[in-house]
Amino acid sequence: MRREVITFDKTDRIVGNRPEHFHRNPDPSAKVKEWACNSPYCEDLAGPHPDDGGPEPIVQGREPWRGGNR
Ligand SMILES: [Zn+2]
């Protein structure tokens, strides 16, 4: 039996156990150039990390259009 252990950094955006994908920022001066994320709502995977002023990925179950946290 083999178990794959993946560790995530705190710049990653992993919530729950959905499969992850990787964002990459082509900007060479970015603080975070590559990070893992498993939001189901990402479309553009080439852009700045939230620490670099990019948008925070939407967390499944906490979609702003549900109005759950108002
Ligand atoms: Zn993402």
Image (cartoon, helix red, strand yellow):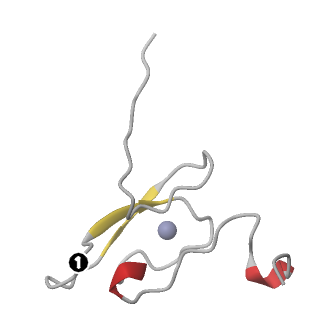
**How packed is label 1: few (under 14 Cα within 10 Å), some, or many (20 or more)?**
few
**Which residue sits furthest left?**
28
Q: Secondary structure at mark 1?
A: loop
Residue type marked 1: Lys
How many numbered callouts? 1
* Extreme-bottom residue of the structure: 53
Residue 40 percent location from the top left of the image: 62, 65
Which quadrant, please, contains the C terminus?
A: bottom right
Residue occupying image coordinates x 48% and y 62%: 13
Corner quadrant of residue 54: bottom left
Q: Nearer the viewer, residue 65 or 68?
A: 68
Write the residue at 85% across / 76% down: 68
Task: State the residue in front, 59 or 18.
Answer: 59
Q: Is residue 29 above or below residue 34?
A: below
Q: Residue placed farthest to the top in the image?
A: 1
In the image, 54 versus 25, the foreground residue is 54
User: Residue at 23% of width from left, 77% of height from top?
Assistant: 31
Look at mark 1 in the image and give the residue it sits on: 31
| Residue 46: percent from left, percent from top | 35, 79
Q: Residue at x 76, y 64 (%)?
A: 61
Q: Quadrant of residue 2?
A: top left
Residue 7: image quadrant is top left
User: Is residue 61 rendered to the left or right of residue 14?
Assistant: right
Residue 25 at x, y percent in the picture: 28, 78
Q: Ligand 1 within 8 A of label 1's CB?
A: no
Above or below, comparing residue 61 to residue 27 in the picture:
above
Horizontal and vertical percent position of residue 39? 58, 65
